[in-house]
Image: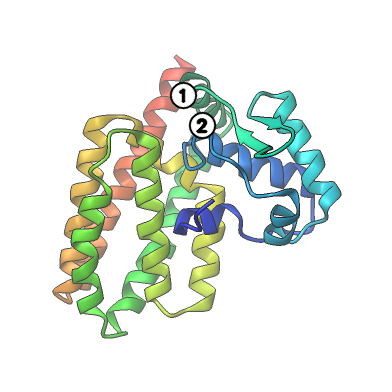
Amino acid sequence: MPESAPGSAVFAPIGSSALVDQVRGRLQDAIALGILAPGERLPSEAALASRFQVSMVTVREALQQLRVTGFVMTRRGRGGGSFVDIDVGRAEELMRQRVRGLSRAELVDYGTYFLAIAEAVLRRIAGQGVAGEAETMVGRFASAMSVHSGGEARVAQGSLDLRLAGLSQSVRLVREQIAIQNEFAPLLWMCMNEHEARVNLGRLHREMLIRLADEDVEGAIAQRRTAVGTAVRWLLDVRNHEEA
């Protein structure tokens, strides 16, 4: 599987507690959101163990749980391996279940934390003299967002978020971005399943990059704040609808 930026986040090392659940959850979220697409072949068990920094036994148990719940299937023989096996409708329902499992306060708190990291990244970039790089990213991001599915749009968004963290040249911010991206971004950008939301968020993030290229960091942060706020409000609307 190609090593994309969001893919790097998906396969970032796992912590030491509840390892099987964490590996299963990381892969399950990536599958449900289309970051790992239906039919896509997962890395080998050895490769997953190396990337997650866990044992082969942990990976095998996590994959077994995903097989039982219908997220992956295993093919034997030449060309075999573990493959993503889930339909779009079921994937969306699973993510809505995740939203229902969080309180309104928790959703707002996650959004606040995500935005705090995003703002820190933008301020750090502003002091790095990389306006030219930001200008180049405008066209790339616009092209990447010219897609027709929420999963593809989330891949493009995840790539942008990680690329920005990398431009900050801060190891700590990169780690924080990867952590929050694994924990909350799968829910935050759920709204990209809707065409109008994809267009709106794409426009806001393109404007953010333009402001960053113009060295207007406050303007860039304002666009980012609006984008994250829009996505969080969408989640709260979903949460309210489920409670009604």
Q: Quadrant of the C terminus?
A: top left
Q: Residues within 10 Å of mark 2 (few under 14, many from 20)?
A: some
Q: Is residue 195 left or right of residue 30?
A: left
Residue carrying label 2: 38
Q: Residue furthest front?
A: 78
Residue carrying label 1: 88
Where is residue 12? Give x, y as percent. 61, 59
Q: Distance from label 1 to label 2 (Cα)?
A: 9 Å
Of labels 1 and 2, earlier in sequence is 2
Q: Secondary structure at mark 1?
A: helix
Where is residue 187? Give x, y as percent. 47, 39
Do residues under tags 1 and 2 come within 8 Å of each other at their CB atoms? Answer: yes
Does residue 26 lie above or below 149 as drawn? below
Residue 208 appears in view: no
Where is residue 185? Give x, y as percent. 47, 47
For marks 1 and 2, give the one nearer the viewer: 2
Residue at image x 52%, y 41%?
36
Q: Is residue 220 left or right of residue 120?
A: left
